[in-house]
Amino acid sequence: MKKAFSVTAVILAAGLMLAAAAQDMTKKDAAPKPAASPSQAVLEQWNEIGRKLIAMAEDFPEDKYDFKPTPAQRTFAQQLLHVSGANYYFTNAAMGQKPPGEGDPKREQYKTRADVAAFVKKSFADGAAAIKAKGDAGMNDLVADPFSNQQMRIVDFAYGFIEHSGEIYGQLAVYYRVAGMVPPESRPKK
């Protein structure tokens, strides 16, 4: 009886493994999804880094918003204001407007965590709206980079700001760790 039960269990397990392998083969044999259009690819990356920074802006304790790991660094809030203000160099150029004024937005203008988080959200929403407005045809339009005084395609200009946002995200992840906290993206998923 025990031998028959063991044989049945082995056959059942083998059948389940074969079914799982067949399902994996079906996925591999399926045609790949089409590539995202140029503007959609930029928009997805823009929104993804925006989502991560917005999550940090809303998550980091308000009483630690003026924390900085060393005296030479910006505070947590100043980092968020910096990256959000920088986004308008992209957005304004893409929309044919003048670049924002010199310097980062001042902390005194954004007194609370809610104020800072709202500015982060708005900067990414405005950038996403500019990308959507340009569409695929507009990704190759030229803009003048105010930092290098060189013409750039909007798609390349956008990716530069996406990279900048990713750099700030990485720095803020360290702020979390130095403050004894775990960044939202590093927490176990529920």
Image: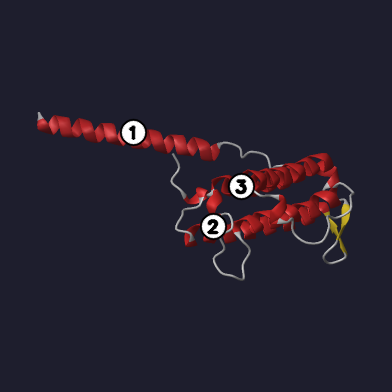
Camera sees residue 184: yes
Please rate how many residues cluster around mark 2, counting C-alpha atoms within 10 Å: few if below 14, some from 14 to 19, many from 20: many
Vertical arrangement, residue 164 with respect to residue 12, above or below: below
Toward which corner of the image does residue 68 lie, by quadrant?
bottom right
Residue 16 disc label: 1
Residue 173 disc label: 2
Q: Quadrant of the N terminus?
A: top left
Amino acid type at mark 3: Arg
| C-beta proximity under 8 Å, tags 1 and 2 | no
Vertical arrangement, residue 39 with respect to residue 101, above or below: above
Amino acid type at mark 1: Leu
Q: From mark 1 to mark 2, how far is it between C-alphas?
A: 42 Å
Camera sees residue 37: no
Look at 82% across and 52% down and name the residue there.
Answer: 154
Q: From mark 2 to mark 3, how far is it between C-alphas?
A: 17 Å
x and y percentages locating residue 125 in the rendered image: 72, 41
- The residue where tag 3 is placed is 113
Q: Quadrant of the C terminus?
A: top left
